[in-house]
Image (cartoon, rainbow, N blue to C red):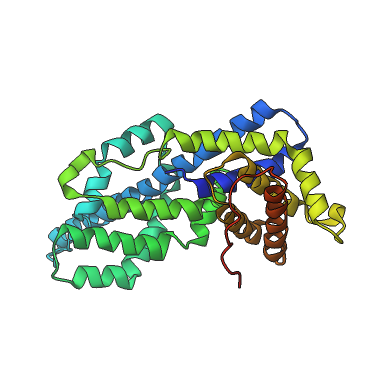
Amino acid sequence: MINRELIRIKIVQLTYAYYQNGTNDMRKAEGELLYSLSKAYSLYHHLLRLIVAISKEMRHRVEVATSKAKREGLEMPSEKFVNNRFALQLEDNQMLNEYADEKVLSWNDDIEFVRKMCNLVENSQIYIEYMASEEDNYEADREVWRKLYKALIQENDDLDSLLEEKSIYWNDDKEVVDTFVLKTIKRFDPENGFKQELLPEYNDEEDREFACKLFRATILNADQYQHYMSDASRNWDFSRLAYMDVVIMQIAIAEMMTFPNIPISVTINEFVDLAKLYSTNRSGGYINGMLDTIARFLVDTGKLRKPIGEPRQRR
């Protein structure tokens, strides 16, 4: 699950923190990086568990309504949503439950938030259309949850605030992790039952090694990389650059120098996008030009042996 995009985001955050805190403890900083990545994996499970928590609360509501209907001779409530095949499969998922037990992940302490989510679900057009539809199959059950997640969970300020209270990492991670949750929903297959596999923590061991190697190269070669930046800045006063710009370029140079199989254009594009998220409005264009200049210098002087390529056009 943890991919290069998330790793780069974490390294930007942790490199900035490394210099701000002034600890100079590389081993501790590397441990913090790996821990922060593991927290992103915990968030992935916690968001999947939110679907389960909402489903359970909706089931409780139907049970209460059913009891009332029996007592008062009213029309029995529909059980279509609480019998949603995808949600029931997710609730029984072996990997999800084992991880939740190990990490003690639960929505029990946030039941009021779960109830608010149930209200949002019941009032949504997605839910109303699903309940009215005569379509009754696994694909429809899975699709309604994909739509509900995108509409009510992916963009939810209250949820963002709640997650930020629980972990300093989670609010920054959520946008990326949401994409993994949606990917997981789409991958669910009724044939797999409770043994449906969730996404692994790392796609392969190379990604974990990529994280550690890039972070160490960034810190240990900082003076050399900043020298390249200073030379490339020409008429700019290097000392007056936004500090986050320096951090982002330093990591980008480390990636260019350390990983021969990653095209230079890919590295530049990735870190220009990160600059737009974490630095000033003008940083993206400036960093794009600076990194291109530095890359050409490194190639021309034989310090970097891979083609420049062309970064994608910026708006």
Residue 245 is left or right of residue 167, and the answer is right
Q: Is residue 230 above or below residue 284?
A: above
Number of numbered discs visible in the structure rendering:
0
Residue 101 is left or right of residue 189, and the answer is right
The residue positioned 68% from the left and 58% from the top of the image is 292
Which of these two is toward me, 264 or 212? 264
Q: Can you say which quadrant of the picture contains the C terminus?
A: bottom right
Residue 226 is left or right of residue 56, and the answer is right
Residue 279, visible in the rendered structure: no
- Dividing the picture into quadrants, the one containing residue 77 is bottom left
Q: Position of residue 203 (x, y in %)?
A: 40, 40
Q: Is residue 64 above or below residue 97?
A: below
The residue positioned 19% from the left and 53% from the top of the image is 85
Q: Can you say which quadrant of the picture contains the N terminus?
A: top left
Q: Position of residue 112 (x, y in %)?
A: 43, 53
Residue 108, visible in the rendered structure: yes
- Dividing the picture into quadrants, the one containing residue 151 is bottom left
Q: Is residue 180 above or below residue 219?
A: below
The residue positioned 61% from the left and 39% from the top of the image is 258
Q: Position of residue 76 (x, y in %)?
A: 14, 63
Q: Position of residue 22 (x, y in %)?
A: 78, 35
Residue 145 is left or right of residue 217, and the answer is left
Which of these two is toward me, 11 or 189? 11
